[in-house]
Image (cartoon, grey):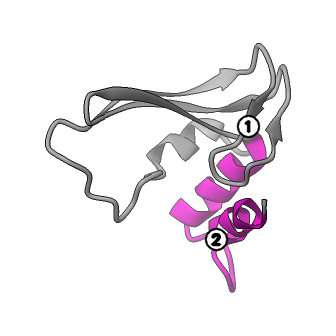
Amino acid sequence: MIDLDDALDFDLFQGDFGEPGDSELSNSIVKGRKEHSCFICSGGILKGENHRRAVWKFSGELHTYRCCNACCVAMIASINCDYDDDDPIDARYAIGDQH
């Protein structure tokens, strides 16, 4: 069984160094109270769907990032190297690039 909390270890901004003072303010798995859009695949996050919500401060401004359940599952597989060929999170980012 997959524990979505494992997705919290995936670095949403790997390789982006940012500026001094940039920081993560919260990072959690939540149940959606309304519909949202996924930061990674640009797909919909339905009301009631468990998903990742992260709040960051960049250059003094607050930003909220939400990732759908399917992207969270791909994050977990990516972190655990639980795949044979292509990293599943890359496929999720590719979906977002098509939107």
Residue 37 is tagged as 1
Residue 56 is tagged as none
Look at the picture and state if 14 lies above or below 88. above
Instruction: Tell me which label, 2 or 1, sits earlier in the chain.
Output: 1
Amino acid at the residue labelled 2: Asp
Residue 7: where, in percent of width, then height?
56, 45
Identify the element where label 1 is drawn: strand
Look at the picture and state if 4 lies above or below 15. above
Residue 20: where, in percent of width, then height?
14, 43
Main secondary structure found in the magenta portion: helix
- Tell which of 93 and 7 is nearer to you: 93
Amino acid at the residue labelled 1: Ser
| 36 sits to left or right of 56 | right
* Magenta residues, start to end: 69-98
| Quadrant hosting residue 62 | top left
Q: Give the labeled residue for mark 2.
A: 90
Could you tell me which residue is drawn at 26 percent across and 57 percent down? 17
**Visible in this render: residue 90?**
yes
